[in-house]
């Protein structure tokens, strides 16, 4: 069965510290991989996509096919990074996104 | 370009009732997906529609149904409401609903079942 695991429900880091939000997936084939973010009182929105290989707001995500992981990283956390983060693999050709349970990132000033 | 809109934003119903939620996608988007968001389960996929056809379905009981109209607007219906149906229901749209496309989310409809 297709599954995504975000092992941490809550991750607290100090401002300026490195951040790593973990995501492991269990999928047949090669899923497309996304990270979505939901800031307080805002709608869920795309943060970055594996296919774009870009860095958004200082975040990057590396696909490790061997470990089936797609961890989200940022070298120096900012207070405005506090939000819910969802790892979202998508497979099967069409939209049937399986979201992880989400990790709440809390950046402590 | 206007974003995804959902109506109503809040609903209070009692057990056994039914409810219909509406979603208007971004203009030009033909794929609409629905999700249920709860604190315990996170975001769970309900179904996806494209060109008035349901293409994908999640693991929800038959009480959850949906449809899509020719203008791509979509509705979701939940019959015989249960307390556990209390959740934030999100819809998302994309151009063609392929797996590599970004989804654009609406603000959600918060449903409370008493």
Image (tube, coloured by chain):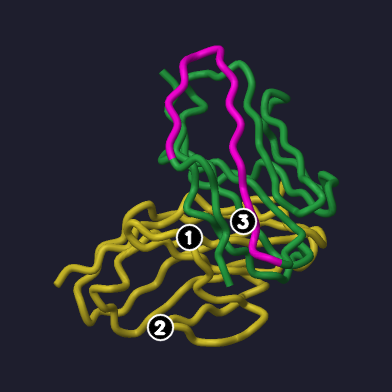
Say which residue label 3 marks: B92
B2 is higher (above) or lower (below) than B50: below
**Quadrant of the snapshot with the C terminus of chain A:** bottom left
Q: The green chain is which one?
A: B
Say which residue label 1 marks: A44
- Marks 3 and 1, how far apart at CA: 9 Å
Q: Which residue is drawn at 23% across and 73% down?
A: A79
Secondary structure type for disc 3: strand
A95 vs A100, nearest the viewer: A95
Q: Which residue lies furthest to the left in this view?
A: A109
Check whether the beta carbons of the residues at disc 1 and disc 2 lie within 8 A of each other: no
Query: Is residue B54 visible in this depiction of the protein?
Result: yes
Q: Where is residue B89 in the image (x, y as percent from the top left)?
A: 53, 42
* Extent of the magenta region: B10-27
Secondary structure type for disc 2: loop
Q: Which chain is yellow?
A: A
Say which residue label 2 marks: A57
- Badge 1 or badge 2: first in the primary sequence: 1
Q: Residues within 10 Å of mark 3 (few under 14, many from 20)?
A: many
B14 vs B8, nearest the viewer: B8
């Amino acid at each position: 069965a297709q599954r995504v695991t975000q092992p941490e429900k809550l991750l607290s880091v100090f401002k300026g510290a490195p951040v790593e939000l973990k995501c492991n997936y269990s999928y047949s084939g090669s899923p497309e991989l996304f990270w979505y973010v939901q800031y307080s009182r805002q709608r869920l929105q795309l943060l970055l996509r594996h296919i774009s290989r870009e860095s958004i707001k200082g975040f990057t995500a590396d696909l490790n096919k061997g470990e089936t992981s797609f961890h989200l990283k940022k070298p120096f956390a900012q207070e405005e990074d506090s939000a819910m983060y969802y790892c979202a693999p998508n497979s099967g050709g069409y939209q049937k996104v399986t979201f992880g349970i989400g990790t709440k990132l809390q950046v402590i000033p | 370009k206007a974003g995804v809109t959902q109506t109503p934003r809040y609903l209070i119903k009692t057990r056994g009732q039914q409810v219909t939620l509406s979603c208007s996608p971004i203009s030009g988007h033909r794929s609409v997906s629905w999700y249920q968001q709860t604190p315990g389960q996170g975001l769970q996929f309900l179904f996806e529609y494209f060109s008035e056809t349901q293409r994908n379905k999640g693991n929800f009981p038959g009480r959850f149904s949906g449809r899509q109209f020719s203008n791509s607007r979509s509705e979701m219906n939940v019959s015989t409401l249960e307390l556990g149906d209390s959740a934030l229901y999100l819809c998302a749209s994309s151009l063609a609903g392929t797996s590599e496309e970004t989804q654009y989310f609406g603000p959600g409809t918060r449903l409370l079942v008493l």
